[in-house]
Amino acid sequence: MSALTRFPTLLVHGGAWAIPPEMAEDHERGVARALETGYRILTSGGSATDAVEAAVTILEDDPTFDAGRGSFLTSEGKVQLDALLMDGSTLRAGGVACVERLRNPIQAARLVLDKSPHVYFVAQGAENFAASHGMPLIDNSELVLDREKLRLEEAQSRLAQGLADTTFSGPEEPGVPSNRSSFEGWRDDKSPETAHPLTTAVSEAGPVSEVGPGFSPGIHSASSPDQRGASMAPSSDAVKQPQPFDSHDTVGAVALDQHGNLAAGTSTGGTLNKTPGRVGDSSLIGCGCYADNHSAAVSLTGWGEPIMKLVLGKWATDRVAQGVTPELAAQQAISYLFTRLGGHGGIILLGPDGQFGLAHNTPGMAWGIADNQGLRTGLII
């Protein structure tokens, strides 16, 4: 697609994990609201950065998602939020992490992007900076839901029993130890995801790294615009599997405006029962979020530690800069995440020509696309 025929495009995700059936409708409805809000800005001539900020704000305000109100709780029972916003035309970026008194961290990230010579603020410093520019500070209790208090209790009980966290991977696979951390050969030193014993292999998406015996990334992917079709249709099978857990995950958006500029934003409440002060991939440039007009815009979701180790967002956009289509680059990124570190997650990737790719290796991922062909949402690709 040439620059002369470029159309505004917005992609959003509401997290990649095993979405339980009782939350399926809320996920699609929330993603649709975010799409409508952000795409209205794009079709009115607004910037990609404005559209991404608006879309992510909608998702932060929706307690269905792990961002803003209703986020996961730390081990001490508080909400700590992280967010990043990046403008692909200038490479200006703004990030905040470990904020407890801001309702919309993506808006604080926008303030950092626009009004600070710095790129990143954390904790009280981030809150003070946002407040100095007019953002109201709230009590952390306004972000905490009773639903999340119960989830925290359950998670801490599972941890005490030595049970694995299957939030992102789905149910245990036959033949795989349920308490993988007790098997040194399977252990990832920074997360409950599995670092597989490595043997050389080639994935369907290309020879990106290595894979443990008996495992498959199980990548779901889709592309645009000329290769859309049945693969984009949501499958109810993905959300009707009974799951032994209940969770939710990071949100994000990427946009291309009519001026040819890209932007990306990611926001999260982090992982359930995390140690206070823990920062994941979402707000780190090049990890969970990145945008550059010369390559692509990306937002990731999933378990953050493996994504950080691979600097996966930048890895994917570099592939696009090298001539790989966003469709294939998205597949390769998720394949690399799994085969190198056993990670689970999802990605939305948008090129400067309007081509995009989506992929995930989790049981589901809430996604939405808005472009000249209309608005579409789904829970599996």
Image: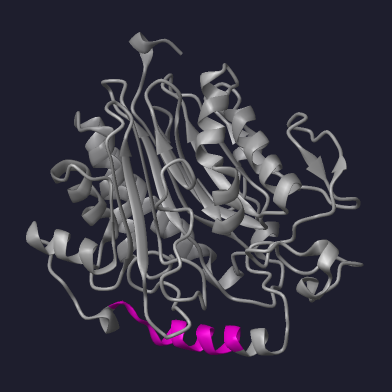
Is 348 on the left or on the right of 291, as rendered? right
Does residue 35 show up? yes
Residue 141 versus residue 309: which sits nearer the camera?
309
Give how far across and how far down residue 133 sits, in percent. 8, 56
Where residue 262 sits, quadrant-wise, is: top left
- Horizontal side of 380 relative to 179 (left or right) equals left
Q: Is residue 273 found inside the magenta-colored segment of the image?
A: no
- Residue 374 percent coordinates (x, y): 41, 34
From what the image shows, is residue 241 above or below residue 370? below
Q: Considering depth in this image, is 310 or 295 the residue closer to the camera? A: 310
Q: What are the residue bounds of the magenta stretch?
A: 143-156
In the foreground, 268 or 182: 182
Residue at 16 percent across and 42 percent down: it is 114
Residue 31 vs residue 161: left or right? left
Q: Indicate the position of residue 285 as horizontal and vertical percent values.
A: 41, 43
Rendered residue at 26%/62% (across/down): 104
Magenta part, dominant SS? helix
Residue 151 lies within the magenta run: yes
Above or below: residue 279 compared with residue 348? below
Above-or-below relation of 167 to 377: below
Q: Position of residue 342 (x, y in %)?
A: 73, 54
Residue drawn at the location 28% of the way across and 60% of the way down: 105
Left or right of residue 379, residue 87 in this image: left
Can residue 375 be spotted in the picture? no
The quadrant of the image that shows the C terminus is top right
